[in-house]
Amino acid sequence: MAKRVILGMSGGVDSSVSALLLKEAGYDVIAIFMKNWDEKDEFGVCTATQDAEDARRVADQLGIPFYVKNFEKEYWDKVFSYFLDEYKKGRTPNPDVMCNQEIKFNAFLHYALKLNADYIAMGHYAQVEERDGNFYLLRGKDKNKDQSYFLSRIGQEALSKTIFPVGHLEKKEVREIAEKNNLYTAKKKDSTGICFIGERDFDEFIDRYLLAKEGDIVDVDGNKLGRHSGLIHYTLGQRKGIGIGGVGTGEPWFVAGKDLKKNILYVAQGSNHPALYSISLIGESPSWILGEAPEMPMKCTAKFRYRQSDIPVEVNMLEDGNIHIKYEYPVKAVTPGQVAVLYKDEVCLGGAIIKSIEPLDKKYEHLNRTY
């Protein structure tokens, strides 16, 4: 009998081509659209409804069963609540990483296994490789689309049951396959932004859930420059939307820190201001692809945000279970709440949530960047 694969179908071109490739490979494919969020935008449109319809059209084209499964409660409890809690702490979370950890490769996986699935599949640009009974997460072939960063907190159980059908392809090849086979989503543009916000105004969205309190904007030397609209609206390294242009040298201002107790937003002028740089970080809740930490100290590379170039680092385990990551050279705008993901060449080792950063210059320790 053909192996059964349950595909998470999003309504985009990547999962559409994944469905085609799985069917061509002889799998028994069932497509399921994950309904994680149900809310209309300011135009009264729920993009999830349209995405589900697009996915259904492709499934019909390919002659594979299609269903919608509601994961809204799990998403709210495990991802959105986490997202709000992190903003309350002054941090900038990455909900896409948590969605993969808690929904796609946990709740969805276990739902699929109850349906007698041999595997699940997703349209991510990443690869899985088995070596001596261990399952390794590798970067996708297309380095511009590689999504291993977002998958860094999934483990062996999920990887042993996961197929990434387009992980060995370039994005342009995926588009070509879709067009060649006249798939309904062949020319559909890629989605952008956080899934539950989409392309809406972020500040307006977050204000519906958290109270934004105005406060002072102060430069790193203690000079008051203006007023901010609420610390939840700002993230470290941010340039746009601060609202103090034209002050000082005329160079742009950047967010350099936040003091939650005093409700102060700290800023530094100039893109190369030393207050924007750090030399190491503490990562909490480390998660390892192989299930256990590599031998420490460890030299490897790291990414502190998606699409960032690899940075050579040295990693050490701390007594409290957190990890210390020291960079080979100072790095700008490393942000608490984001994920530090570690690599050995093409292999993703895992990562940790950034808890605090060590400033390049000790005189900027007062910027309160431990949340």
Image (spheres, rainbow, N blue to C red):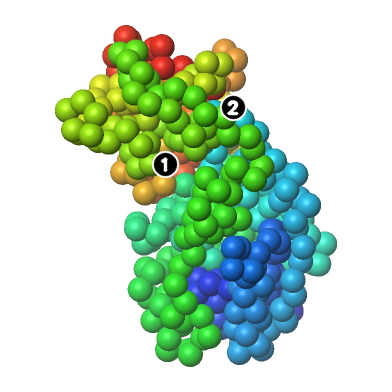
Residue situated in front as seen by the camera: 84 or 15 = 84
Q: Quadrant of residue 218?
A: top left
Tell us which disc is closer to us: 1 or 2. Answer: 2
Q: Residue at x 57, y 13 (%)?
A: 319
Quadrant occupied by the C terminus: top right
Viewer can see residue 294: no
Mark drawn on residue 348: none
Quadrant occupied by the N terminus: bottom right
**Residue 360 appears left or right of 147:** left
Residue 50 image offset from top left, x and y in percent: 62, 75
Q: Hey, what amino acid is under mark 1?
A: Arg
Residue 175 image offset from top left, x and y in percent: 41, 77
What kind of element bears circle 2? Answer: loop
Residue situated in front as seen by the camera: 216 or 253 = 216
Disc 2: which residue: 89
Q: Residue at x 57, y 29 (%)?
A: 213
Q: Hey, what amino acid is under mark 2?
A: Lys
Dot 1 or dot 2: first in sequence order is 2
Disc 1: which residue: 305
Residue 107 image offset from top left, x and y in percent: 74, 53
Residue situated in front as seen by the camera: 155 or 212 = 212
Distance, label 1 to label 2, CA atoms, is 19 Å
Q: Residue at x 72, y 78 (%)?
A: 66
**Residue 312 appears left or right of 175:** left
